Every structure is written in C-alpha cells, then in structure tokens.
Image (cartoon, grey):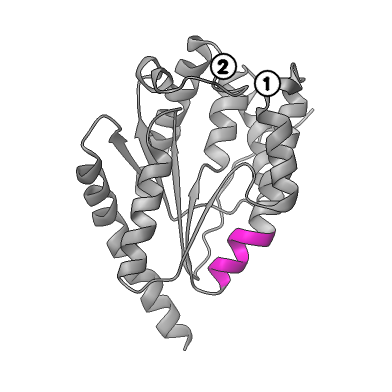
C-alpha cells in the first residue's frame, strides 16, 4: 500500500511550462492552439503538445485507454497506462523543450489523472498522485489553466465518444470538482476561467496571465548567459 506524501513540485528555471485542463468539451485544444499561435507571433519558440499520445509509445497507450474496443480495464491498470504515457512524454518531449528554453503548452497533464482516474474512478487520490508524480519526476507547470464547464454542456458537443467521454455524468461531475479543488489549493499556479465565455475573451485573459511568466523566463535565460 502506498503511503500518502506531501509533494512540493519541481518548476524548471528554463523555459515556460503551461498546461490546459478541464472537462470534455471545455475548449482546451482551441485555447492551447490560440496561445501557441499568439506566442509564436511574438517570437517565442513554442512546443504544442498533448496527453495522452504525443510520443510513439504514447500513441499506442492512447489507443488502449481511449478506444471503446478496449472494453473494461481495471482502474489501477488505467492509472498505470496513463502514468507510462506521462513518463515518456515528460522525458522525451517536455523536459528537453524546456531545457532548450522553449514554451511548452500541453493539453492535459497530471491533473487529468487525478480528476479522472482518482476522483472519477473513486480511487484514493493520494495513491494516484504518488504514481503520477513519480512518473513525471514531480515536474509542475508554471501555470495551469482550468477551463471550467458543466459536463452536461461539454459532453453535449460530442457525437461519438471514447471510453472516458462515455462515462456517466456523475463521473464527469466528480472530475470537474476535482479540477476546481486542485486549482483552489494552489492559486499562484492556476487560472480558472468559465469555458462558456467568448473564445477571444478567454484567449486574452490567458495571454494576460502568461505574459509576466514569459518575462520571468526571459530574465532567467539572460541571467544564465
């Protein structure tokens, strides 16, 4: 049995790590793309990525965890598959880009595992977190943007659904509350926005929050020479 631990987190001094989280249909992919495009237009080197699946190994894991053809999985098996995707993603995509001083923007990260496999599946959050933090080396985003949406609205945007999208409304309500709880516990590293707001208004508010973080990253890079 795992022993619950206090996690302090690792925030790399190089680059800038931004994560988008939230329920299904919240517009994460749209907002992450808009932020990437805006930052690139300002001259920043941006690595736009996602979980699960943005590595060769991860693509196979994504097929397993999301395809309806997979059928029922043990909840613990699901946690470990997502953790394997995260370990590969962090080691081969996220950390190398940050060490090059790039801006990394990811659509989903550890909070999704805590919300879906932890709160959604009803597993012990502390145990799920220990697995996820170990898999990622406890690397934390400098900023996590939570796009909050009522699952009754978000899920209505889909016709065909994958294994997670097809879960019950109660599952998605528990996940939504988990995202909000995580944000409330660490307001310095989170920005919570109502996903129903105008797309361009959301993009502007996200850029406003990211801008001073870019200045910090630039100053750190200059100090290192």
Above or below residue 124? Residue 217 is below
Q: Main secondary structure of the magenta part?
A: helix
Q: Confirm or deny contact between disc 2 and disc 1 (CB under 8 A).
A: yes
Q: Nearer the viewer, residue 111 or 125?
A: 111
The correct choice, above or below, for 52 with respect to 10 in the image is above
Who's the residue at 75% across and 25% down the image?
76
Residue 221 percent coordinates (x, y): 44, 79
In the rendered image, residue 27 lying in the magenta stretch gets the answer no
Rendered residue at 74%/31% (across/down): 64
Q: How dense is the environment of label 2, judged by Cα within 10 Å: few (below 14), some, or many (20 and up)?
A: some
**Residue 126 location (% of width, % of height):** 63, 30
The 10 Å Cα crowd at callout 1, few under 14, some 14 to 19, many 20 or more, is some
* Left or right: 62 in relation to 207: right
Left or right: 207 in relation to 105: left
At which x and y percent is residue 192?
32, 38
Residue bearing mark 2: 166
In the rendered image, which residue does mark 1 sit on? 68
- Comparing 114 with 36, the one in front is 36
Q: Secondary structure at mark 1?
A: helix
Q: Position of residue 39 (x, y in %)?
A: 34, 64
Image quarter where the N terminus lies is top right
Quarter where residue 73 is shown? top right
Whether residue 57 is visible to the viewer of this picture, yes or no, is: yes
Residue 131 appears in the picture as rendered = no
Q: Which residues are magenta?
A: 92-99
Rendered residue at 53%/15% (across/down): 171
Q: Residue at x 35, y 25 (%)?
A: 149
Query: Disc 2 and disc 1: Cα gap in Å?
Result: 9 Å
């Amino acid at each position: 049995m795992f022993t619950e631990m206090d996690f302090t987190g690792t925030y790399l001094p190089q680059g800038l790590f931004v994560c988008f989280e939230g329920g299904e249909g919240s517009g994460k992919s749209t907002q992450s793309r808009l932020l990437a495009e805006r930052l690139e237009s300002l001259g920043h080197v941006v690595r736009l990525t996602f979980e699960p699946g943005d590595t060769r190994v991860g693509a196979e894991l994504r097929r397993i965890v999301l395809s309806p053809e997979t059928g029922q999985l043990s909840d613990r098996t699901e946690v470990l598959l997502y953790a394997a995707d995260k370990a590969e993603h962090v080691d081969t995509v996220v950390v190398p880009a940050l060490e090059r001083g790039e801006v990394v923007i990811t659509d989903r990260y550890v909070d999704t595992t805590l919300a879906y496999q932890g709160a959604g599946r009803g597993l012990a959050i502390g145990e799920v977190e220990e697995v996820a933090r170990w898999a990622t080396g406890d690397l934390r985003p400098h900023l996590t943007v939570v796009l909050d949406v009522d699952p009754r609205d978000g899920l209505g945007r889909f016709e065909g659904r994958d294994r997670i999208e097809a879960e019950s409304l109660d599952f998605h309500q528990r996940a939504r509350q988990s995202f909000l709880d995580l944000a409330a516990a660490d307001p310095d590293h989170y920005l919570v926005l109502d996903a129903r707001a105008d797309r361009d208004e959301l993009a502007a508010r996200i850029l406003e929050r990211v801008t001073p973080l870019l200045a910090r990253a630039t100053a750190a890079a200059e100090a290192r020479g």
